[in-house]
Image: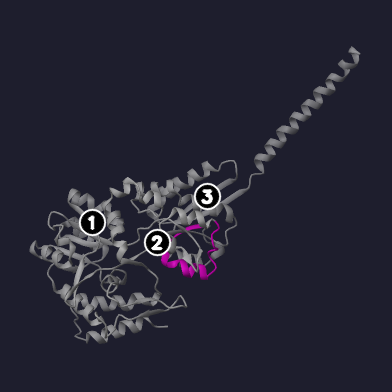
Amino acid sequence: MKKRIFGLFPSILCIAALTGCDLTEKTDLKKTELQKVEMVVWGAEEDTELMNQIIENFQINYQGEADFQILFEVQGESQCKDALIGGLEDGADVFTFADDQLNALAAAGALDPIENVDKIRDRNLSSAVQAVTINNQLYAYPLTADNGYFLYYNKEYITEEQVKTLDGILEAAAANGKLFTMDWSSAWYVYSFFGNTGLQVGLNNDGITNYCTWNQIDGDIQGIDVAEAMLQIAKNPGFASHTDQEFLEGVKNGSVIAGVSGVWNSVAIKEVWGENTGATKLPTYSCNGRQVQMASFSGCKLIGVNAYSEHPKWASKLAEWITNEENQRLRFEMRRQGPSNIAVADSEEIKQSPEIVALLEQSEFSQLQRIGGKFWDPVSKFAESMAAGNPSNQSLQDQLDEMAEGVSAR
């Protein structure tokens, strides 16, 4: 018996060895069987460091569930739609874009409705949820709620009372030999003068063409009233129509003490004005014998998932990860961009940020930018004429009619 057992022992060792080899092979096989997930993320150049950090943390969080190879590539948010529609199958799996591109992207089949609707609605500001919604369907993930503009001013020269009206701001600027600036070459900013007057602009039901009543000749405020108000502002020695870059240069060289801009300039302005940096909603302006609150376009940055992604589930997970509470908080810390996430928006850090508070104040007088491409050039042409003092001496009503016709062109 002892012999028999002894005789079997090598066989047992062999079986054990083989079994051990088999287990090792299975373990190695399991490691090699992890799904290879290659994805590309598009975003702004200024977001490179932030996005790479977010992507790295995503891969750490889901390590062991897939073999990730995620690459961040720079792609301007404002050109994202054109770059993506030019080749959907070759485009990024996940991408950052401005909300005014949502309709076109959805219509082109670039975006599928997202699945976790209730979670997105519960976690984000209602305005941000509206920005990702088409016909009650959500097509993207809200990332920021700060794509708008407000007033920056230097407290050394302008009082809290003066800053309430454009008349007061211009008076302070002229008295000090300084300037208030606003970009009238950009139709985006020019909307401010028309938005709260009862005059209308927006998308037709086709989602492509516009309607425009900015040339209206009846009502409490007519188009010509706004045009005349703009001419009066343009004549003031305390005003200049400057681009955003020129505004910032004026802040740095001391010639500008107030201007309309957005959160993207907050750090640079604070470096110059320091404790004298003020930020608030846009002022009222004089129009047809009354004070009219200046309006604004508002908008959000969104994260989209390419409907043609080879890894739709992982792309959706990554999009949700980029926009979650933790990473929106990180985005504010690193890039000072205003969150769409409710919890972050209500945090003490945000409440201590004057520019974000100003944006939230202005949101009461803003509307989502939902306009077709024919809007921009006619409005810019009209406003540049006003900024120059109407050098052609063409009838204001004629110019308003031409603008409205151009905006509404099919």
Residue depicted at 48% across the width and 47% down the height: 55
Residue identified by numbered label 3: 70
Q: Residues within 10 Å of mark 3 (few under 14, many from 20)?
A: some
Which disc, if any, is residue 270?
none
Q: Residues within 10 Å of mark 2 (few under 14, many from 20)?
A: some
Q: Quadrant of the C terminus?
A: bottom left
Amino acid, disc 3: Ile
132 over 394 or under it: above or below: above
Q: Which tag, 3 or 1, sits closer to the chain's start? A: 3
Residue depicted at 41% across the width and 48% down the height: 50
Mark 1, secondary structure of its residue: strand
Q: Is residue 346 left or right of residue 279?
A: right
Q: CA distance from mark 3 to mark 2?
A: 31 Å
Region of the chain picked out in magenta, as a range:
94-115
Q: Residue 96: x percent and y percent? A: 45, 58
Q: CA distance from mark 3 to mark 1?
A: 39 Å
Q: Seen from this angle, which residue lies furthest top?
A: 2
Residue identified by numbered label 1: 279
Amino acid, disc 1: Ala
Residue identified by numbered label 2: 127
